[in-house]
Amino acid sequence: MQNGLIHTKHTKSASVCFLAACFLSVAASFGGGGEKLIGDESDGSRAVPVHLIKLIDEQGQEISPEDDPILPFSTRQTCGLCHNYDVIKTGRHFNLADSNVPSGRSGEGWIFVDAATGTQVPVSYRKWPGTFTPRQVGISDWRFLRLFGRQMTGGGVGELENLEEPQEIIRGFVSGKLEINCLACHNGAAVHDQGQYGLQIERENFRWAAAATCGFAPVSGSAKDMSDDYDYLMPDVPDDPKLVTPGITYRANSFDAKKQVFFDIVRKIPSQRCYFCHSNKIIGKDQPERWAVDEDVHMAAGLNCVDCHRNGLDHNITRGYENNTDNYQGTSIESWSCEGCHVQGRLGAPRFETAHKGLTPMHFEKISCTGCHSGSLPVQQTRMVKTSRAHALGTYNAAKADDALPHIQTPVFTADSSGKIGAHNLIWPAYWAVIQDQKVAPISIELLKQVAGKLFAAESPVGDGRGAIDTEKINEVLGLLSSSAAIEGKPVYISGGMLFAVDGGKLSEEPHPAAQPYRWAIGHNVRPAAQSLGLGGCGDCHSPDAPFLFGKVTLDSPVVSHAGRVVQMSRFQHMDVNSMKVFARLYVFRPLLAFIVLVCSALVGLIILLYGLKCLECVLKLIAHADWWSWFRDT
């Protein structure tokens, strides 16, 4: 097909689609259809409709296997014919950049790492305390997609609506938008390969990414290698023969006689789709192999992730924690929390009261369900854990080294926003920053390297790829930052819970709120009652060496002088360490105290019984001496 015909075809198709959209909009307004499309309303059947449909590209044109060039299908256009894309994109997985959406309880943010400069900092578009927005760290929306799009579901930031740099806007036309990848969750085909998604993100093949995962449309080439004037509708052959233009090839048997394609769409999403972005691996030589680890008790019982994490058309998925009532438009979602099932007895769950006999109410006021049942059991020294979103687990380029950055510790028992103690993952932030008006703000990596890059280039990295930083190096870097006109405010370095600053020509370090660790709750894997914390008795938490209170949390830091530093777990529970130690040591006398109480109670009972018998003796004597028979006869 000639290039002129390509544009003519797309122009006609766009016109037809525009007129069709106008007609449907008018029809919906007269018919009272509102925003719902044909696929958004159920007739009551629990069966999933067969998705044998035509593929539509982002221009709104039907894709034919004879097209040249043949284009990737657009989920907005293809899925959007029957499902309201604009409603779906308001869902929890897609609205992270929407400032009007309640942030909810702190979750796992994205962790930006730059090993050479000793940087690891949690970033999030949501307003979670302890995180920074990508822009605060010097990461644009475009760069955010390049770094973390591998395990995102598209939409939101991927729509490229808020790009500011002219160069990034130009590259957006070359790469296309990263639309919502409906197939990431709803494709039930065994050939679905979500690992391809990250590969296409790395190549900046955003418009091709969703199609590349489906199994019948392999993608080749790289938009990243194309020039700024590259046109995917009229692709020119690159001058360099080593470069390959991004393209897609649909397998010959994908289309039927009507040029329709079958998608194995499932309504109830398989858990393996969730695992791609929500897996974790605890690191340690003492850790068993994967085949020797028990599955989450709910999965072992036959449940799926979506049995608890539910959503409607708006895809505002419930997160399942207590008081998770953000932005659910009055819908009662308490029944999809731990208490919802185990108090109400839904889905055959064991009753809360039966499983917790003997525990005082104070335990449930101070400790969350996940405190005893989620994650791994506490140990004397916290372990390292790798997560999908932090370490790209499941992707083709995942780092398999145990000490790969970022360093996340687990389990840390700390109070959450509700005040209850639960199991958490924890990361110690490390970044170069400035203090201005009593606020700490990170310095962008680009500016940092521009001012002090030569000092970091000379560093020899340690095993995890991170440059070992000593106090002399910190002093030098802060000196260069102070003398730079591009830096506004007092330069500091945050690491290992400490703030480093130069005062009077001398380097000082002190604890600072901005240096405190970022934590997020562990919801899974859930352990049954037979494996819960406390099964070994009260001593699991109240003995003098109980890891729950006195376990050691490593102060992770690239600063050489900080190596080996630890803090006690009780620091994160808002408890007085000395009081807890005294209580723990006295707690060993609890069995003796219980025995004394029982003996005293028995003695008191015997005394009461003795006096009761004496009282009965007096009553009987009174009856024996009274002339009761005469009184009865006269009456």
Image (tube, grey):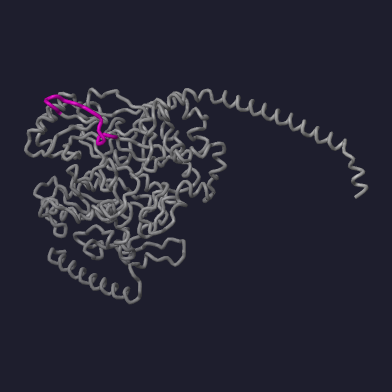
Magenta region includes residue 505: yes
Question: Could you say which is closer to the camera, residue 214 or residue 414?
Answer: 414
Q: Is residue 570 above or below residue 259?
A: above
Question: Could you say which is closer to the camera, residue 422 or residue 49?
Answer: 422
Q: Position of residue 312 (x, y in %)?
A: 39, 58
Q: Position of residue 393 (x, y in %)?
A: 31, 40
In the displayed structure, does residue 9 sit left or right of residue 605? left
Q: Position of residue 507 (x, y in %)?
A: 16, 25
Q: Is residue 337 visible?
A: yes
Residue at point 25%, 48% (across, down): 125
Residue at point 44%, 40% (across, down): 368
In the displayed structure, does residue 246 sit left or right of residue 518? left
The magenta segment is 502-516
Quadrant housing the N terminus: bottom left
Question: Could you say which is closer to the camera, residue 83 or residue 516?
Answer: 516
Q: Is residue 462 above or below residue 305?
A: above
Question: Could you say which is closer to the camera, residue 123 or residue 66?
Answer: 123
User: How many labels, in total?
Assistant: 0
In the displayed structure, does residue 76 sit left or right of residue 613? left
Residue at point 22%, 52% (across, down): 206
Q: Position of residue 457 (x, y in %)?
A: 13, 30
Q: Is residue 221 visible?
A: no
**Quadrant housing residue 396:** top left
Task: Work out which residue is located at the far bottom of the displayed protein and give it.
Answer: 30
In the displayed structure, does residue 156 sit left or right of residue 477? right
Magenta region includes residue 257: no
